Image: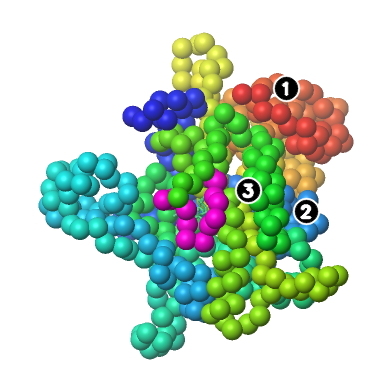
Amino acid sequence: MSDAANEYQGKATMEKITSLAKRRGFVFQSSEIYGGQNGAWDYGPLGIELKNRIAGAWWKEMTQLNDDIVGLDAAILMHPRTWEASGHVENFTDPLVDCKKCKSRFRADQIPEEKLKEKKCPDCDGELTDTRKFNLMFRTHIGPAEDTASVIYLRPETAQGIYVNYKNIIQSNRMKIPFGIAQIGKAFRNEIVTKNFIFRTCEFEQMEMQYFVKGGTDEEWFNTWRQRRWAYYEKLGVKMDHLRWHQHGPGELAHYAKEAWDIEYLFPMGWRELEGVHNRTDYDLGRHTEYSGKDLQYIDQETNERYIPYIIETSAGLTRNLLMLLCDAYDEEQVAEKGNDDDWRTVLRFHPTIAPITVAVLPLMKKDGLAELAQDIRRELKEDFTTDYDQSGAIGRRYRRQDEAGTPFCLTVDYQTKEDGTVTLRYRDSMEQVRVGRAELAQLIRKGIKEYKRIK
Ligand code: GAP
């Protein structure tokens, strides 16, 4: 095990996360009945709720809380010249080697240096092929003819859709530099090695924000965005000792970047990139000017100055964030000492803003009108919160099921509810239970979300 994995403080392992994700309907392997499709995953009922909420939290942070950032949803299929201009056709490659004996395939930069020098397979010591460059873009054809004129790519990053629209947005929304454009969407990469569940996949989603600034102010904005992105994870309640910065050295920098820092998270398999903050300079807009022949200079209306803006990019994986938040939330806690399985609970300590279900309503019994009463209370809360209803099994079991789904609030409806209209509100993290009136419920839950502080 690597040193980083030894440092790991959480209780999650990739096996536990993968199994919980499948069992509870967060994530399923794509096309499982056919043996599964490598590098692709499907998001089940809890997974899609979680993903939408993570996307929603990011979108709010970027657009709602920043007057100078607007949104965009560009097409996945773009004119192929885009990718020549961006440098992806030429440079977006991984070094690939194959083992002639066991036929395993590796990224050369992920093999121990010694093995690569000796051209020996790290798995079986068989002979390795020479290293060759492999372009990560998925290529396909548009229209019926499969010739070079019809080649089209699935976008490997969402960023380029923003760059080619930057003038449209300035014109339609009267944006003035500095300003940003945010986008969430699918991206595709023909990854050589896809492992660790949804960490690195061929089809994934990104949450990217491109901030357009004047050259000379770029370094200051770069630092500002680094701080903001760090603060964002703190606000989401992520364990901050599981986050760190990693600066890209000269050999690591992408072809477009002058400076790049990753926020890394301590996953069960070690420290890995979660999000990148990049100073892309005027590279992208300069290249699009050259390849499109269009003038992409910004005109400062006050000074009449014209220039190609610099771009500060914050680029996070949405699906990778989902994996991070699952690992970060995962906890196993001893709650009793009776010597049976129920002594322990598995709990996902999601921040309530991202929890897939906010409130679960549980009637103590199905009979005596309690189920109907509970359904009625659920109906009242539905407009404001995502709710769940569960009437099967012992109440303790039902709490455990909700803990495992990360539901922050449970409401239990019992005989007293019939008498005085109060219910038991149970908090997921502390398991504290309070008796509250039906009329106060929505307000209390809202308060619980707003004032949430992680206790473990
Ligand atoms: N536009 C810049 C860009 O795409 P990147 O570092 O290649 O930069 C940004 O990717 C983020 O996208 C990564 O930090 C990661 O969270 C996510 N990401 C990249 N490749 C991925 C993959 N194959 N599977 C899942 N997420 C990926």
- Please say if 21 is above or below 215: above
Q: CA distance from mark 2 to mark 1?
A: 38 Å
Task: From the image, tell me which residue sits under label 3.
Answer: 54
Label 2, label 3: how many angstroms apart (C-alpha)? 18 Å
Mark 3 vs mark 1: give the one in front.
3
- Color encoding of the figure: rainbow
Q: Quadrant of residue 359?
A: top right
Mark positioned earlier in the residue sequence (2 or 3): 3
Left or right for 217, reference 243:
right
Q: Secondary structure at mark 1?
A: strand
| Residue 255 part of the magenta segment | yes
Instruction: Mark 3: give few (<14), some (14-19) or many (20+) Cα within 10 Å.
Output: many
Left or right: where 455 falls relative to 130: right
Residue type beneath disc 1: Gln
Magenta range: 251-262
Residue linked to disc 1:
433
Residue 181 location (% of width, % of height):
69, 62
Image point (68%, 61%), residue name: 215
Q: Which dot marks residue 66?
A: 2
Tag 3 and tag 1, C-beta contact below 8 Å: no
Query: In the rendering, at what x and y percent does residue 211 appear?
Result: 68, 59
